[in-house]
Image (cartoon, coloured by chain):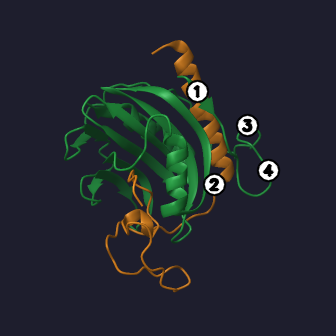
Chain colours: A orange, B green
Amino acid sequence: MPAILQRSLAGLALLAAVAAAGCSSGSSKHSPPAHHSSSTPTKNGIPQGNVGDNDADNHGAPSDGDGNI
Amino acid sequence: MTGLAVLAGCSGPATTPATTPARAGSAPVVRALAARSAPPGWHQARLPDGTAVLAFPPSMHLIAGDVGEVSAARVSASGTFLLYLNSTPRQGAETLANWPVFRVRHQRKEDSVSVRMLAASHGVRFFGGTGTCVIDAYVTRVHANHFTELACFVQGQAGASVIVAAAPTARWASAAGLLFRAVEAYRVR
């Protein structure tokens, strides 16, 4: 890999890590993978209902690479 | 690489990544993305359509996901995602050119109440292809979980796919090294 590319990507990683650290929060509760349930209670107990394609990432899990809604 | 852009900072008072102070004890992992084989002992999972192979460390395990995808995660006993990897075949209008904007727009529409693009780069080399990568931080619509991800759209000869590597934002600095390593080992054809 060209040195300039390595330097650029290293910079990318540094900037992102610093930015992410600066933006971090005390997030503590994630939903486990859950699929195709009809509704999802939120922290305040109000049913969220279906959102997006209703896969796990629509229920508080990390977002997958699905390009569709 | 043909481009590197830091396009957004943190929410709240205007800041930029360059001016945002790193918290004590959260020294970032600084390392370039460079296509290289997975370390010995790592597992591999092939996309059902055969266009990509996701490598993941023994500390992670395969989890259920949408049809056609493969996902691996490290999840705490309480259900907290600590590490997350996902490979998904191209499903929408994403391209090498539009990926950073496409990804952020998709996040905002589907999953997140807020999303911030932190960096983006084009022309990233992968085994078997070329990719465009974006790093963004977002807050999920459900449970308001904070995640940071490295998400790359990778074009191979036989098809295109997306690899996502994510961790809770509060853990990103310590998780990034392993997640970047997994992205570096991603293979497409």
Label 3: state its secondary structure: loop
Asked if labels 1 and 2 touch by Cβ distance under 8 angstroms, the answer is no
Q: Is residue A10 left or right of residue B125?
A: right
The three-letter code of the residue at mark 2 reads Ser
Is any atom of residue B60 visible in this view? Answer: yes
Label 2: few (<14), some (14–19) or many (≥20) C-alpha neighbours in 10 Å: many
Of marks 1 and 4, which one's residue comes earlier in the chain? Answer: 1
Q: Distance between the residues labelled 1 and 4?
A: 24 Å
Amino acid carrying label 1: it is Gly
Circles 2 and 1 on the same chain: no
Same chain for mark 2 and mark 3? The answer is no
Q: Do labels 1 and 4 share a chain?
A: yes
Compared to B108, does B165 lie above or below? above
Query: Residue A11: image x %, image y %?
Result: 61, 28
Give the label on residue B18, or none.
3
Residue B114 locus on image (x, y percent): 61, 60
Q: Mark 4 points at which residue?
A: B14
x, y percent for residue A55: 36, 66
Q: Taking the image as drawn, is residue B42 in sight? A: no
Q: How crowded is mark 3: few (under 14 residues within 10 Å), some or many (20 or more)?
A: some
B132 w.r.t. B15: above or below:
above
Q: Mark 1 points at which residue?
A: B3
Which image quarter holds the C terminus of chain B?
Answer: top left
- Residue under the point 48% across and 80% down: A48
Marks 2 and 1 sit apart, C-alpha to C-alpha, by 26 Å
Q: Which mark is residue A24?
A: 2
Q: Which chain carries label 1?
A: B
Query: Do the dots labelled 2 and 4 sit on one chain?
Result: no
